Structures are given as structure tokens and as C-alpha cells.
Amino acid sequence: MSDVVRDAAIRVVRSAERDTWRPLVDPPGEIPSGGREADVFSAGGGAVSTGFWERDPDTWSFERPYDEVALILEGDADIVTDDGRTLTVGTGDVLVTPKGSAGTWVIRKRIVKFWVIYDA
């Protein structure tokens, strides 16, 4: 999360305007594949932030250092949890990954998500 916007003005940020998103720097993954992101809003001294994230098909492990709720706008993926469950997410689904949760992303079709992070 960098360049997070804190602005009192009402505005619209369009997920389709991805040419303004910045490329992911050193994204993890087996391939590694490309991706982009855009920070949208931050409040509470950065405790709450929101943005968009896009990632091409790839596989990598993660452990969340914060709480995240994400609305999947496009794509198809599995999240294989450390306890062995496989959770499939697709367009319209909400993915909740609490702080300390861990697993593996397996993206089959480019994923685009709108995320909300709580990191206090």
C-alpha cells in the first residue's frame, strides 16, 4: 500500500480504467505472472485502506499480516488454506482473509478484486 489517497471530495474510481494502475513490483509466484494495482482510499492514519488489484494466472503462498475483505470483480481462482480446504472464488464473491490466515493462491483466470484492508 503506497500513495494511498485521503481526500474529502466525492469521486468515482473506475475499475475499467486500468491503464492508470501501477504494475506490481516483484510479485510472488511460480511463473511469475504480471499484475497491477491502484490504491483508492485510506483513513484512520492508514488503519483502513482500499484499492484494486489484478493478477494473471499463477500460484503462490501467502500469510496475511492484516485483515482483508475483497470483492472479486473478475476471474477465477482457488485459495487452498493451510488446513487443507480449497475455497473457489469467482466474479461477485467476497473473500475474507483474517490477519494471520495463510494459504496458497491458484489463479486460473485473471483475478481483479476490490479490497479493503484493516491494519491497526
Image (spheres, helix red, strand yellow):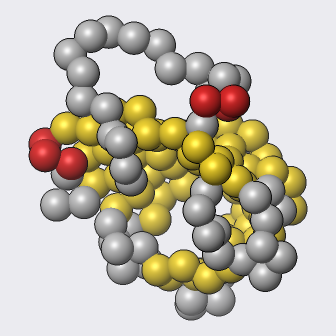
Q: Is residue 8 above or below residue 54?
A: above
Residue 15 drawn at (x, y percent) = 62, 27
Q: Which quarter shows the C terminus?
A: bottom left
Q: Quadrant of residue 77?
A: bottom right
Residue 88 in the figure: left or right of residue 69: right
Give the image quarter of residue 78.
bottom right
Of residues 74 and 19, the one nearer the viewer is 19
Q: Residue at x 39, y 53 (%)?
A: 1
**In the depicted structure, whether residue 16 falls above or below residue 59:** above
Q: Is residue 88 visible?
A: yes
Looking at the image, residue 33 sits to the left or right of residue 99; the answer is: right
Disc count in the image?
A: 0
**Is residue 95 positioned above or below 12 on the image?**
below
Horizontal and vertical percent position of residue 34 = 75, 58
Please tell me which residue is depicted at 83% across the width and 62% down the height of the picture: 57
Q: Is residue 59 visible?
A: no
Closer to the camera, 1 or 69? 1
Query: How far from the left and from the top, in percent, is residue 46?
Result: 21, 48
- Name the residue rendered at 75%, 40% in the picture: 74
